[in-house]
Amino acid sequence: MANELVQDAAKAQHLVVLVHGLWGNPVHLKHLRDTLAIQREGEGLYLFCPKANSDAFTYDGIEVGAERITHEIERKIDELRAAGSKLSKISIAGYSLGGLVARYTVGLLYKNGVFDTLQPMNFTTFASPHLGVRTPRLGYRAQTWNFLGSRTLSTSGQQMFLVDDFRGTGRPLLAVLADPSSIFVRGLSQFKRKSVYANSLNDRSVPYYTSAMSRTDPFVDVDAIEVHPLPDQEAPVVLDPENPVTPRTHKEDKQLSFQERYIVSARTRQSLPFYAVLCTVLPLAVPLFLINAGYQTYKSAQRVRLHEAGGVIDLKRYRIPLLEEAQAMQDRVMERFAAERTHLNEESGKGYLPTPPPESAASSSSSSSVSDADESSKLIPSSSPSVSTATQRKQQENNTSPWPTLALTEDQFAMIDNLDKYVGFIKYPVHILKVQHTHAAIVVRMAKDSFKEGHAVSAHWAKCFEV
């Protein structure tokens, strides 16, 4: 690839893995990679962008993508060591869907013992939907989005909209990813620095509440808040994670013209070209999108069948117990059962041990026993993604912020609680104002003048990066 960095494998001390997002490829993270390489030149970093889950392959599900990438990372580690490197550290960053794939990958690396030889240093996500992309808003437009989105992005769409049943557990994959007894949280907690960068405005792919794992959204009315950027930035974009915003004590009384008051506001006028293009393109784009979604779902199902059959990688290394405490409890039960049966068999002259249940049953029983093993997980299985009135009332009562609690699901509230308590991300709101869609700008996905504010994000990340 023309954009490959020239790196000396023999001098690698710290492997940095960058994971792209949905429909993405490694080129999308070129700016992030180059910024870190320039700011930390000569410090032993080796930057690696896996390619095994590029483009349409991202349809195939978070766990399938993570298994591909974990395999690629482990091969890269072997390659660097064979080249004579003294590799001792690892960091991982994910953009958009890549942040969720990276979290799953961390669990697999942790369980496979990679962190026994490589110290986990930095884990970062940029505009990643940690709570999924199901909109918490009410109304037919929001519900239409939730319905169509979960059915047009294959397995990955179901997982991001929280309508999947992960491996027969009765829970969405994202809920399992946030379970305190899971390998995913255990692995994440080992990283020295854990941070997220979340767009505050105009991210139509991943809204603020989900990328920042927040039960409120203070950026709904920007005229009602004061933002507090961190000092010493190229642009005042990255906000103070300890005090990102405060309510304005008084709103400025803006004198509206007759046209703004009764015909069209200035903000609406600025958006008119965008909506004009949208209305022109939409009638053609929607049918094409649905046709392509159907085709990609079909192709994805074929790839997943090949993957599940072990036709690409050896899955035995990656299909491991995901909930450690539940697995430990199951092992203790089996040992006790075996001891009792052995005692009875010795008395009857028949010495044999019971056959353990098959893996599918083990996974199912582990998920059902985790609530008994660790009540602090707070992950309540729910067949419906809607939030109960009792849960909403409780969340409102516990909300001490000036902003109202969003209508999230019980699983989503539990994810926030667990990730805050057991992982402890530093959450940086990113306040980009000069583009209509900030999802690409936060990582400068392409070289555009309008994405200049995104340079401040990558520069801040590189400056805070623990080497």
Image (spheres, rainbow, N blue to C red):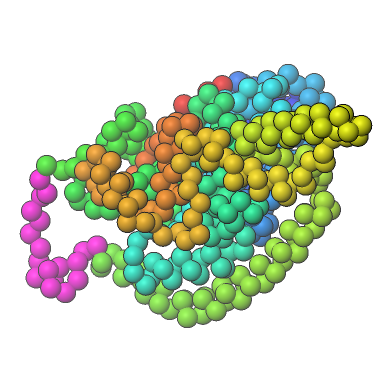
Q: Is residue 33 visible?
A: no
Q: Residue at x 24, y 47 (%)?
A: 403
Q: Whole-percent x and y of residue 409?
A: 41, 54
Q: Nearer the viewer, residue 442 or 194?
A: 194
* 271 left or right of 101 in image: left
Q: Which residues fall within the magenta stretch?
A: 250-267
Q: Whole-percent x and y of residue 245?
A: 26, 39
Q: Is residue 56 magenta?
A: no
Q: Whole-percent x and y of residue 300?
A: 70, 63
Q: Residue at x 25, y 49 (%)?
A: 404
Q: Quadrant of residue 240?
A: top left
Q: Residue at x 19, y 49 (%)?
A: 224
Q: Is residue 258 magenta?
A: yes
Q: Does residue 393 lie above or below 140 as drawn?
A: above
Q: Whole-percent x and y of residue 357?
A: 77, 45
Q: Does residue 311 lie above or below 455 as drawn?
A: below
Q: Does residue 445 lie above or below 8 as drawn?
A: below
Helix, strand or loop for the magenta stretch, by majority: loop
* 59 left or right of 195 in image: right
Quarter of the image with the C terminus in it: top right
Q: Quadrant of residue 430?
A: top left
Q: Residue at x 29, y 37 (%)?
A: 244
